Amino acid sequence: MELLLKFIDIFLHLDIHLKELIETYGFLTHFILFAIIFCETGLVVTPFLPGDSLLFAAGAFAAIGGLRIELLFPLLAMAAFLGDNLNYWIGSHRGQGLYPELPLSSQGISGEDSALLCTARR
């Protein structure tokens, strides 16, 4: 229970915790942020990570000189891009195992028909 409360505190006070992270790890904070954004966009089980709010907070710290924007922007853009591609790859290779009865468009079903089949099941 204590771990859950600590996790909620991090979400609610992200600016304070990011400041502590910058003070503790300095330059390595850029790579820690890379890992968080990559996991948030790329791993199917971690969409609860603070992606958007973390980007705003990191941008604010970059504006006041706490982080280097010339490194932060390309790193976080790459993290989001690579994470998105990983998530797509996981879905394309493991998605049919989760929904084996849904036909793919490569099997002769158009995208529109496939969408109708998906919404009709609900």
Image (cartoon, rainbow, N blue to C red):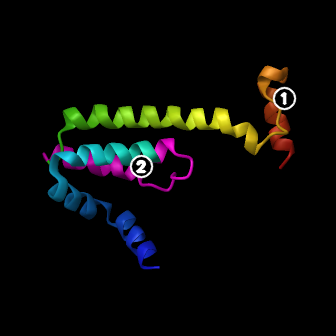
Left/right of residue 119 with respect to residue 26 in the rendered view: right
Provide the residue span drawn in magenta.
40-65
Give the residue type that dot 2 points to: Gly
Residue where numbered disc 2 is placed? 51
Left/right of residue 59 with respect to residue 52 in the rendered view: left
Q: Nearer the viewer, residue 99 or 17?
A: 99
- The x, y position of residue 115, in whole percent, is 79, 34
- The x, y position of residue 40, in whole percent, is 46, 47
**Which residue is found at the position 77% from the left and 26% from the top?**
111
Left/right of residue 15 with respect to residue 88 in the rendered view: left
Give the residue type that dot 1 points to: Asp
Q: Are marks 1 and 2 in contact (CB under 8 Å)?
A: no
Find numbered disc 1 in the image and state the secondary structure of the residue it sits on: helix
Marks 1 and 2, the one that precedes in the sequence: 2
Q: Nearer the viewer, residue 64 or 37?
A: 37
Residue neighbourhood size for the residue with mark 1, other residues' Cα within 10 Å, grouped as few (<14), some (14–19), many (≥20) = few
- The x, y position of residue 56, in whole percent, is 32, 48
Specify whether residue 70 is painted magenta.
no
**Which residue is found at the position 17% from the left and 45% from the top?**
27
Residue where numbered disc 1 is placed? 113
Chief secondary structure of the magenta portion: helix
